[in-house]
Image (cartoon, rainbow, N blue to C red):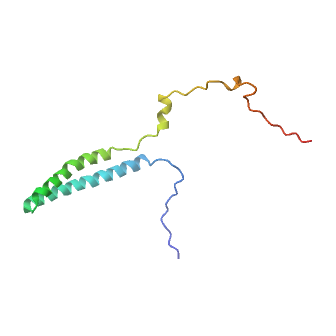
Amino acid sequence: MVKRQAYEPILITDASRSQHDQLTSRQRRYVLMMGIRVACIVAGAILVGAKAPLLWLWLPLCAVGMVLIPWLAVLLANDRPPKEEHRLSNRFHPRRRVETPPMSLTAEERPHKIIDVEP
């Protein structure tokens, strides 16, 4: 018997991800980064309590993790894909008007129709 694979839709469009999907991925990224921050805090406390060798090296690394990671987590959690340009282009840039209307073309400039007449 052939095993059926889970249904995966084929994408035939270039539509962006839904708002819900974008928010969910940003939330997961934020929680993961804050978990790494907590690990830095715990590791720093354990290193100080155990009086680890090279403490002068490990504590600044943990401190950098505790300071930079929350800042990056907030920046990345608030980051959204840019809006498409064409959605706002009509509001800020007026439409260009055609310089010469089509009827003002001379007879030589107008396209000619070729008519086939069968004998």
**Residue 8 drawn at (x, y percent):** 49, 60
Can residue 72 be seen here? The reply is yes
Q: Residue at point 31% right, 47% down?
A: 76
Image height of 50 relative to 67, above or below: below
Asked if one can make out residue 44 in the rendered structure from this viewpoint, the answer is no
Q: Is residue 42 left or right of residue 87?
A: left
- Residue sitting at 53 percent across and 50 percent down? 13
Image height of 45 relative to 107, above or below: below
Percent x, y of residue 24: 36, 51
Above or below — where is 24 with respect to 115?
below
Q: Position of residue 71 (x, y in %)?
A: 24, 45
Query: Extreme bottom residue here?
Result: 1
Instruction: Give whichever of 70, 111 is nearer the camera.
Output: 111
Give the residue furthest to the front: 108
Quadrant (top left, top right, bottom left, bottom right) of the C terminus? top right
Work out whether 103 lies above or below 74. above
- In the rendered structure, the answer to whether residue 111 lies left or right of residue 68 reads right
What residue appears at the point 78 percent right and 35 percent down from the top-left corner?
113
Total numbered labels: 0
Residue at horizontal 54 percent and vertical 53 percent from the top: 12
Which quarter of the picture shows residue 62? bottom left
In percent of width and height, residue 114 lies at 80, 37
Horizontal side, residue 116 vs residue 48: left or right: right
